[in-house]
Amino acid sequence: MSIFFSYVLLGLTLAAPIGPINAAQLDKGIRYGFLHSYLVGFGAMVADMLFMLLIYFGSAHFLTTPFMKTFLWCFGCFVLLYTGIESYMKAKDALPSRTEAKKEPLRRSFQAGFFMTLSNPISILFWLGVYGSILATAAQTYQALDLLLYSSGILVGLFIWDILMAATASTAHHFLSDRVLILISKGSGLSLVGFGLYFGWQAVLALFR
């Protein structure tokens, strides 16, 4: 059981670094509440689960081909720029009333997290490197069912972080002023735009190499 909890801790550690998903969760939670923020993280977790399954069954290497990486950089650039610009433009909706929350479909939050992660070549390479190496090492000691159990520990860690981020973002309006909430929402939007520009630059480099 201690081994399982070590994998849960690994999942928490993998989710914690600041990236586009955390920025999007923060923005959605401030503007629309807990469920929208949670679904961004859940969408990302579903994409992570897909990567893990592909790696587990040895089918993920096609995602690292030059064509696929270039396509994913381009698609990721579009998703991040669109989401970031939209977040920045709607920053005033970050006020506690959240009058626009009912107009925002829940599926958009899930899709945002899912496609941000799915179209991120860094995530693919990250999971290939981290999870792939863990799987290769553990396979020498444990059976297939044990590997699935311990892999689920990583997902539990990601789920816990998702809940924590959504709860933190959605309750921010209780202890932050309207001005600060708007600034945080704008900052999250600019952060997503920054990640999008980075993805776009990587796409340009990949196209002209």
Image (tube, rainbow, N blue to C red):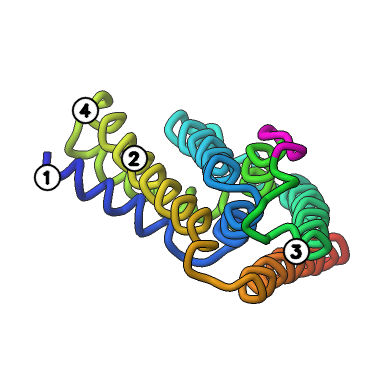
| Quadrant where the image shows the C terminus | bottom right
Between the residue at mark 1 and the residue at mark 4, the CA separation in whole angstroms equals 17 Å
For residue 91, which numbered disc appears in the image? 3
- On the image, numbered disc 2 is attached to which residue? 156
Can you tell which of label 2 and label 3 is closer to the viewer?
A: 3
Q: Count the labels in the image.
A: 4
Q: Residues within 10 Å of mark 1 (few under 14, many from 20)?
A: few
Mark 2 lies on a secondary structure that is: helix
Between the residue at mark 2 and the residue at mark 3, the CA separation in whole angstroms equals 32 Å
Residue 197 location, x and y as percent? Answer: 79, 68
| Extreme residue in the top direction | 145
| Extreme residue in the front direction | 97
For residue 200, which numbered disc appears in the image? none
**Does residue 53 sit above or below 16 in this rendering?**
above
Q: Amino acid at mark 3?
A: Ala
For residue 143, which numbered disc appears in the image? 4
Left or right, 142 with respect to 103, comes to left
Which is more N-terminal, label 4 or label 2?
A: 4
Can you tell which of label 2 and label 4 is closer to the viewer?
A: 2
**Does residue 97 sit above or below 182 in this rendering?**
above
- On the image, numbered disc 1 is attached to which residue? 2
Magenta segment range? Answer: 102-107
Residue 117 location, x and y as percent? Answer: 62, 47
Q: Amino acid at mark 4?
A: Gln
Q: Nearer the viewer, residue 92 or 169?
A: 92
Between the residue at mark 2 and the residue at mark 4, the CA separation in whole angstroms equals 20 Å
- Magenta highlight: main SS: helix
